[in-house]
Amino acid sequence: MIQQVHTKKAPTAVGPYSQAVTANGLAYLSGMLPLDIENGNIVGNTAAEQTEQIIKNIAGLLSELNLTLEDIIKTTIFLDSIESFQSVNEVYGSYFSLHKPARSCVEVSAIPKGALVEIEVIATLN
């Protein structure tokens, strides 16, 4: 059974989609932007600062499911410029030093709301 997840612990969706859905023992988090949960504005002027905000938002959404970053099994990082790879990797690595989910990282031509970074996540519910 598929269940939609909605929480005030993470930014609201900026389109016709759920913040996350759960199905078959997994949580699929939609791409997370570096948005302030109070006003929906972008937080941070650099890719590193935005990554920090995104991970905080991901942690908030996971907490709604009684999960933590340790439950993440796969991430996909979207960058507006591959030149940001190193700075994003440094912030990301500070959260995933022992537990290392599988990951993809790609450059894209644009990210919604003019963000520099977007991250989507798959986590286990077990």
Image: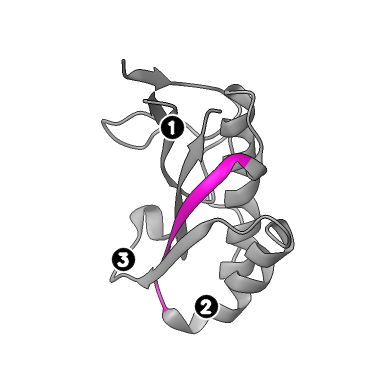
Mark 1 vs 3, N-terminal side: 1
Q: Which span is picked out in magenta?
A: 71-81
Q: Residue under circle 1?
A: 26
Say if 85 sits above or below 121 in the image. Answer: below
Amino acid on which disc 3 is placed: Ala
Q: For label 1, count other residues whose C-alpha is less than 10 Å away and answer few (under 14), some (14-19) or many (20+).
A: some
Gap between marks 1 and 2, in whole Å?
27 Å
Say if 61 sits above or below 89 in the image. Answer: above
Can you see residue 9?
yes
User: In the rendering, at what x and y percent does residue 120 appear?
Assistant: 43, 49
Say if 89 sits above or below 2 in the image. Answer: below
Can you see residue 38?
no
Main SS, magenta region, reads: strand
User: In the rendering, at what x and y percent does residue 112 appear?
Assistant: 35, 54
The image quadrant of residue 115 is: bottom left
Quarter containing the C terminus: top right
At 60% from the left and 53% from the top, the residue drawn is: 43
Amino acid on which disc 1 is placed: Leu
Nearest to viewer (mark 3 / mark 2) = 2
Q: Secondary structure at mark 1?
A: strand
Nearest to viewer (mark 1 / mark 3) = 1
Mark 1 vs 2, N-terminal side: 1
Give me the disc on residue 110. 3
Mark 3 vs 2, N-terminal side: 2
At 73% from the left and 59% from the top, the residue drawn is: 98
